[in-house]
Image (cartoon, grey):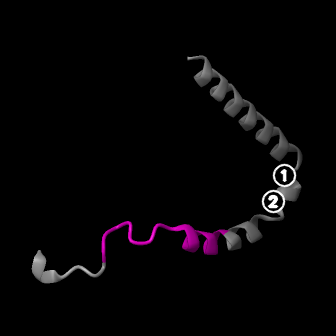
Amino acid sequence: MGRKRLIGAVVMLAFIGMFFLLKEHWSHVAGYWPYLLLLACPLMHLFHGHGGHGSHNVDSSKK
């Protein structure tokens, strides 16, 4: 039980730290949003699970 509490405390401190960091530097972060969105598109294509929704080479006669 002690390890779970430690992990929970670390996660909560990380969230609180990120909140205050973003609060103080929001004007800097907001300027990079268009670039982050453009970077997210190719990253989603690279890391999206290919073939995770079934095979496209399924023989229709086996149904």
Per the rendering, the mark at residue 30 is 2
In the rendered view, does 57 fall on the left or right side of 42?
left
In the rendered view, does 61 fall on the left or right side of 48?
left
Q: Quadrant of residue 14?
A: top right
Expressed as whole percent of the image width and height from the top left, the position of residue 18 reads 77, 41
Q: How many marks?
A: 2
Residue at image location 81% in from the left, 65% down from the top: 32
Q: CA distance from mark 1 to mark 2?
A: 6 Å
Expressed as whole percent of the image width and height from the top left, the position of residue 28 reads 88, 58
Residue at image location 62% in from the left, 75% down from the top: 42
Looking at the image, do the residues carrying marks 1 and 2 touch, with CB atoms under 8 Å apart?
A: yes
Expressed as whole percent of the image width and height from the top left, the position of residue 13 reads 74, 31
Amino acid type at mark 2: Ala
Q: Which residue is mark 1?
A: 26
Q: Quadrant of residue 62?
A: bottom left
Give the quarter of the figure containing the N terminus.
top right
Residue at image location 84% in from the left, 64% down from the top: 31
Residue 58 vertical position relative to residue 23 in the rendered view, above or below? below
Amino acid type at mark 1: Trp
Q: Is residue 36 magenta?
A: no
- For label 1, the crowd category at 10 Å Cα-Cα, with few meaning under 14, some 14 to 19 and many 20 or more, is few
Q: Quadrant of residue 63?
A: bottom left
- Nearer the observer, 46 or 24: 46
Residue 16 vertical position relative to residue 37 in the rendered view, above or below? above
Per the rendering, the mark at residue 36 is none
SS label for mark 1:
helix
Expressed as whole percent of the image width and height from the top left, the position of residue 41 reads 62, 73
> Which span of residues is magenta-colored?
40-55
